[in-house]
Amino acid sequence: TPSSKPHPPVVGRVTHHSIELYWDLEKRAKRQGPQEQWFRFSIEEEDPKTHAYGIIYTGYATKHVVEGLEPRTLYRFRLKVTSPSGEYEYSPVVSVSTTREPISNEHFHRAVSVNDEDLLVRILQGG
């Protein structure tokens, strides 16, 4: 039985549109035996408006990359660990901010192709 709260998800690589989370520091994930004897993991994301949590991943893996995120935005996640008997525990919440959007060649070419000198100067000066 999950007697103690699981650790919150650990933050891996963060970009302007994705956050890598990994978990199961307690090493509860065992891949031997029938699947109904495995611990199941769910990652839930908080809706900033309603403060309700929605499931964005459920399965037996111990990492997940959350994609399609907004740059420079704060996200809140928690881990739900469900034991084979159906009991579950939630981890404390982890807050992660995505990074600012990198200046891409696409921005650069767009500024050049429309001959937008102001935009070009802003890009070259670092946004």
Image: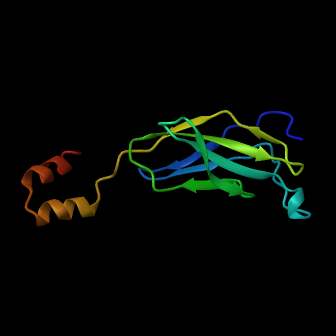
Which quadrant is the N terminus positioned in? top right
Q: Position of residue 49 (x, y in %)?
A: 47, 36
Q: Position of residue 69 (x, y in %)?
A: 45, 51
Q: Position of residue 23 (x, y in %)?
A: 70, 47
- In the figure, is residue 67 to the left or right of 93? left
When the figure is inspected, residue 19 is found, relative to residue 110, above or below; the finding is: above
- In the figure, is residue 119 to the left or right of 23? left
Residue at x 76% of width, y 45% of height: 81
Location of residue 111 by image quarter: bottom left
Q: Position of residue 34 (x, y in %)?
A: 90, 64
Which quadrant is the C terminus positioned in? top left
Residue at x 41% of width, y 50% of height: 16
Residue at x 14% of width, y 51% of height: 119
Q: How is the image coloured?
A: rainbow
- In the figure, is residue 29 to the left or right of 62? right
Q: Which residue, as the protein is rendered here, is positioned at the far right?
A: 33
